[in-house]
C-alpha cells in the first residue's frame, strides 16, 4: 500500500459527502487536525469523532441528515490514519493530551460556546472523557456503540481482532470485518479505505480504564447511547444497563440488525433519525 493509494481511496469516500463540503486544517499543540465540514455556517456546531482506524469520511451515510440543522465538523484523529498530521515533538500519550487536543481543536474551529459531540467506538471513549473534562463545552453527547465506556470487550472479539493488531494488513482487516459484520454488504469504497488504513503509519492509540463511576454519576448533560444490536464487540444489553445505572440524564437504545463495525454508515436511517431527534 502507498500513501497515494490510501488518499485516493479516502477521496472516493469523501465524494459521498454532500455537495459543497469544505475541508479545513486546524493547528493544535499536538499537530494539524483535518476536518470535513458541511451544513449551514451559522448553525450550531456538531463535532464527529470516528472509531479507531477510521476517518472523518466514515460518516458519509449520516452527515446529509445531520447537516440540515447543524454545522458538522468530522475530524481525523491525531496519530490515526487520515489527513491529520501529528507533531513529532509532542505526541498524544494520555487522556489529558486527548482532551487538550480537543480543547485546542474546538478553539480553532471557532466553537466559543457549547458543541454537540458524537463519537463512534473509540471515538465515543474519547468523547465521553472530553465531556467529563469540559462539560461546560458540550451541550449534548451522543455515543454510538462506544467501547470501554461502560463494559469491556468480549473475549471472542479480542481473539479475532488480535491478528489485525499484531500484524495489520488489508487481508486480515477484510477477514476481521467480514466476521464481525456477519458478512454484511459493506460499502465497497469504505471497505477498501479500511484495508488501506490498516497499513497506514499510525501511532499507538491512547487507551486506559473505563471512566470512574463517580465521575459518570456527576455528569449532568444529556447523553444518547445507541448500540449495535448484532455487534460482537460487547454485550449491548449490559452496556445499556450500565449506562442507565451510571448516567443521570441518558437515553439508551439498540439498533437492530447492525454490527459494531458496520456503524455508523450501514443502514443509517434509524441512527440518523434518533440522533437528529435527540439533538433537537
Image (cartoon, rainbow, N blue to C red):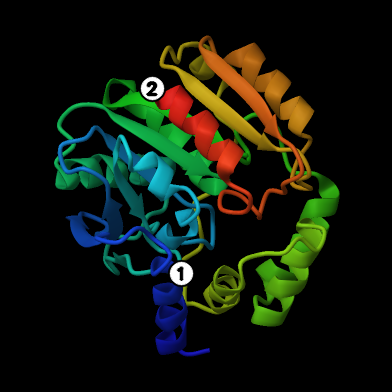
Residue 1 appears in the figure = yes
Q: Is residue 146 left or right of residue 57?
A: right
Can you give x and y, in whole percent of width and height, for residue 135 in the image?
Answer: 34, 22
Residue 208 is at least partly visible in this image:
no
Circle 2 is placed at which residue position?
280
Whether the residues at callouts 1 and 2 have beta carbons within 8 Å, the answer is: no
Q: Nearer the viewer, residue 150 or 20?
A: 20
Q: In this view, does 183 lie above or below 240?
A: below
Q: Which of 208 and 46 is in front in this view?
A: 46
Disc ID at residue 218: none
Vertical side of 198 occupied by 105: above or below: above
Q: In which quarter of the image is residue 118?
A: top left
Quadrant showing the C terminus: top left
The quarter holding residue 106 reads top left
Secondary-structure class at tag 1: helix
Q: Distance between the residues labelled 1 and 2?
A: 28 Å
- Dot 2: what SS? loop
Q: Position of residue 93 (x, y in %)?
A: 41, 53
Question: What residue did someone put label 1 on?
Answer: 13
Q: Residues within 10 Å of mark 2 (few under 14, many from 20)?
A: few
Q: List the single residue furthest toward the right.
A: 156
- Give the residue displayed 35% in from the left and 58% down from the top: 18
Residue 162: percent from left, percent from top: 75, 64
Amino acid at each position: 500500500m502507498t500513501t497515494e493509494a490510501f488518499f485516493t481511496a479516502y477521496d472516493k469516500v469523501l465524494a459521498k459527502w454532500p455537495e459543497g463540503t469544505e475541508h479545513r486544517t486546524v493547528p493544535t499543540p499536538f499537530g494539524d487536525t483535518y476536518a470535513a465540514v458541511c451544513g449551514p455556517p451559522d448553525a450550531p456546531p456538531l463535532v464527529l469523532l470516528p472509531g479507531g482506524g477510521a476517518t472523518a469520511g466514515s460518516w458519509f451515510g449520516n452527515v446529509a441528515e445531520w447537516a440540515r440543522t447543524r454545522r458538522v465538523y468530522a475530524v481525523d484523529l491525531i496519530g490515526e490514519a487520515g489527513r491529520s498530521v501529528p507533531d513529532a515533538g509532542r505526541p498524544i500519550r494520555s487522556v489529558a493530551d486527548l482532551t487538550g487536543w480537543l480543547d485546542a481543536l474546538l478553539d480553532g474551529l471557532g466553537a466559543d460556546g457549547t458543541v454537540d459531540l458524537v463519537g463512534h467506538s473509540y471515538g465515543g471513549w474519547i468523547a465521553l472523557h472530553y465531556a467529563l473534562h469540559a462539560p461546560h463545552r458540550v451541550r449534548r453527547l451522543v455515543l454510538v456503540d462506544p467501547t470501554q465506556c461502560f463494559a469491556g470487550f468480549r473475549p471472542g472479539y479480542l481473539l479475532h481482532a488480535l491478528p489485525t493488531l499484531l500484524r495489520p494488513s488489508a487481508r486480515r482487516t477484510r477477514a476481521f470485518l467480514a466476521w464481525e459484520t456477519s458478512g454484511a454488504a459493506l460499502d465497497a469504497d469504505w471497505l477498501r479505505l479500511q484495508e488501506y488504513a490498516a497499513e497506514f503509519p499510525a501511532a499507538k492509540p491512547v487507551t486506559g480504564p473505563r471512566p470512574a463511576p463517580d465521575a459518570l454519576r456527576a455528569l449532568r448533560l444529556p447523553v444518547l447511547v445507541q448500540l449495535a444490536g448484532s455487534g460482537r464487540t460487547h454485550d449491548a444489553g449490559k452496556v445499556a444497563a450500565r449506562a442507565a445505572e451510571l448516567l443521570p440524564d441518558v437515553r439508551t437504545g439498540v439498533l437492530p440488525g447492525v454490527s459494531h463495525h458496520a456503524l455508523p454508515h450501514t443502514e443509517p436511517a434509524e441512527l440518523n433519525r434518533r440522533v437528529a431527534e435527540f439533538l433537537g
